Amino acid sequence: MATTARNESQVRAVPKARAYLRRVAGTQMHWVELSPPDSSAIDPTLPPLVLLHGIARHAHTFDHIAPEFARRYHVVAVDMRGHGGSAPVEGDYTMDQLAGDVKGSLDVLGIKKIHYIGLSIGGMIGQGFALANPGSLASLCLCDTQPSTPPGSAGNRPKKGDRKTNAAGTLPYHPIPIPFPFPFPFPFPFHSRSRS
């Protein structure tokens, strides 16, 4: 079996993280604060940036880009309830509750105003967060998301007998897998430095 040698410049640095596990709005929530790759210190004086993953993912979804963000931001990657290190949940919950989980996590950290990047359902949660907490946002970046609550979720569930529903009274939901990490570089400003 042939092996390929890689030099140090080809190996991406893994972010150093400080993990939290706290009860927020009745649910055990997990999130991590990440440091730049060339430092072991997390700088809470930098502008806060919250990263929220897509469905069936976790806070470490962003490990490939978070170290670069951490050079200029205090990065907080949250595990949505029922994902990653956050506690599993029973029964239905709403997008408003998920947005409340983000707000509750920020309250524990004492963070008042954030930049927010949400991927897929994380973007939908970001929309709910923005509507409920407009004064808490410095910016909002929604990636690969939609401007509504997913069909069949609590708060958007059609009534049984609605001609658009199946026999169980819910709309069919067919998730499409998203490849991670993305196979291309993100066009963020940190890519402007030389890559030789």
Image: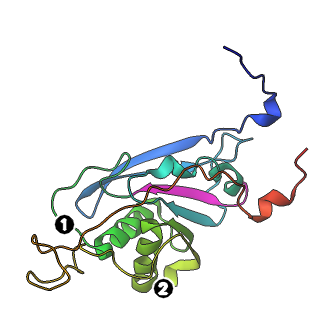
Residue 17 x, y percent position in the rendering:
55, 43
In the image, is residue 160 above or below residue 104? below
Which kind of residue does numbered mark 1 sit on? Answer: Asp
Q: Quadrant of residue 37?
A: top right
128 falls in the magenta region: no
Residue 45 x, y percent position in the rendering:
65, 61
Q: Callout 2: helix, strand or loop?
A: helix
In the image, is residue 83 above or below residue 115? above
Q: Quadrant of residue 148?
A: bottom left
**Which image quarter holds the N terminus?**
top right
Q: Is residue 61 left or right of residue 153?
A: right
Q: Is residue 164 left or right of residue 125?
A: left
Tell me what residue is drawn at x 59 percent, y 65 percent: 48
In the image, is residue 76 above or below residue 100? above
Which kind of residue does numbered mark 2 sit on? Answer: Pro
Residue 73 x, y percent position in the rendering:
66, 61
**Residue that label 2 marks:** 134
Which numbered dot is residue 92? Answer: 1
Q: Residues within 10 Å of mark 2 (few under 14, many from 20)?
A: few
* Sequence-wise first label, 1 or 2: 1
Q: Is residue 17 left or right of residue 10?
A: left
Question: Label 1 to label 2, Cα distance in Å?
Answer: 26 Å
Q: Nearer the viewer, residue 28 or 122?
A: 122
Q: Nearer the viewer, residue 170 or 103?
A: 170
Tell me what residue is drawn at x 62 percent, y 58 percent: 74
In the image, is residue 76 above or below residue 16? below
Which numbered dot is residue 54? Answer: none
Q: Is residue 15 left or right of residue 96?
A: right
Q: What range is drawn magenta here?
A: 71-79
Q: Residues within 10 Å of mark 1 (few under 14, many from 20)?
A: few
75 falls in the magenta region: yes
